Amino acid sequence: MVCLAIFLLLFVGRTLHLRISQGINPLVIGAGKNRAKRVLELAFVVVLLVWSGEVLAHVIHLEFRLFPEILHRPWIAVMLVKFIGAALNVVGLVFFAGALVSLGGSWRVGIDSGAPGELVTCGFFSFTRNPTFIFIGLYFIGTFLINGTAIFLLFAMLTISGLHLQILKEEKALARIYGQRYREYCTRVGRYFPARIIRFQFVAWIGTLVNMGVLWVLKGLLDVPLLVAGACAIELAIIHNFTWHYLMTWRERVAHTAGDYFARLLKYNLITASIDFVVNLSVLYVLTRYFGVFYLVANLIGMLAGPVLKFLANEFLIFRHKSPIDPQV
């Protein structure tokens, strides 16, 4: 509910800012379109409003519901899954905020053929063409994982399907408006996720196994104090992940020399490692100390908390380069 409130504040704030400061109306849903397109866009608004009402009803434990009781019975009641859902909500919100900053005065809700603004290909749009739609998809999935009921699963499935159809429509409109510039942009940047993110996440998963294995050896077998064992596990996983990113994920951006490797490793530790140490150790300590969560489970939750921040730090700070983005998926 907190993330939803932040989203609404960002949405309303940016809308008012564009209307007042630049005289731009960013809300163009259904404007100047044929009946089928207008119905699809308006239907999405209705679904979003009904979904928001269901979220509010769930939070305040309202007895009256629009849908049958069987759709409100929880399918999932595992705390770890709820934490993952909350993490997805936060990640999605980061995508939305980043998209707003990148778009500037070009932000629109719907397809604006009359005054579309400049084509934006920087910031979040340099590695995905649809960060705003990714936010919506992640948020609906995260809400389902938090609540665990069939109604939120149905909302997520319908919304993601509708988003894909809307994206296909927007791609045709943008190609018509911006022409060759947009088509060239599509060849560089993927519709959803670039190949670099896939490689980044694969390395992160392997790093998770390294972290968990080292923590188990130090804490479980050698009985090293928890915070010391956790810190060692994090640092070894950091070195492992950086090496693979240097050799694979961002290989075309580095010099492949010892000096370049260690210089970037130092920067990696100072930036990315600080995210790991602050987020991971804080979650590990708080969950084990105050909530009685098993230390390996608490450690896993901590490791799931900051992947988006770490990718952005790598993309724009540690391995920053102006070369074209690599092939997309």
Image: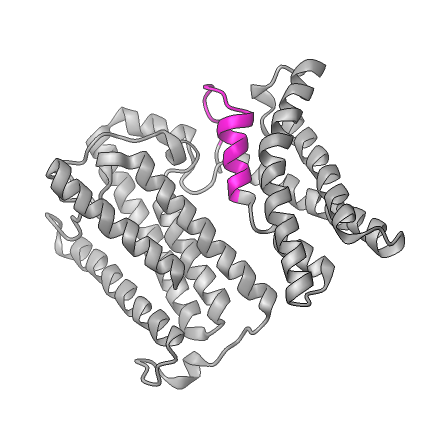
At a point 57% along the width and 20% down the height, the residue shown is 252
**On the picture, is 55 further left or further right than 277?**
left
**On the picture, is 117 further left or further right than 183?**
left
Extent of the magenta region? 308-327
Q: Name the spot of residue 126 as percent of width and height, x first.
A: 40, 31
Name the image quarter holding residue 58: bottom left
In-front residue for pair 141/329: 141
In-front residue for pair 21/318: 21
The answer to if 312 sits in the magenta stretch is yes
At a point 82% along the width and 53% down the height, the residue shown is 219
**On the picture, is 26 further left or further right than 123?**
left
Q: Name the spot of residue 102 as percent of width and height, x first.
A: 33, 35
Name the image quarter holding residue 69: bottom left
In-front residue for pair 227/85: 227
At a point 41% along the width and 69% down the height, the residue shown is 152
Q: Is residue 206 above or below residue 264?
A: below
Q: Is residue 280 above or below residue 139?
A: above
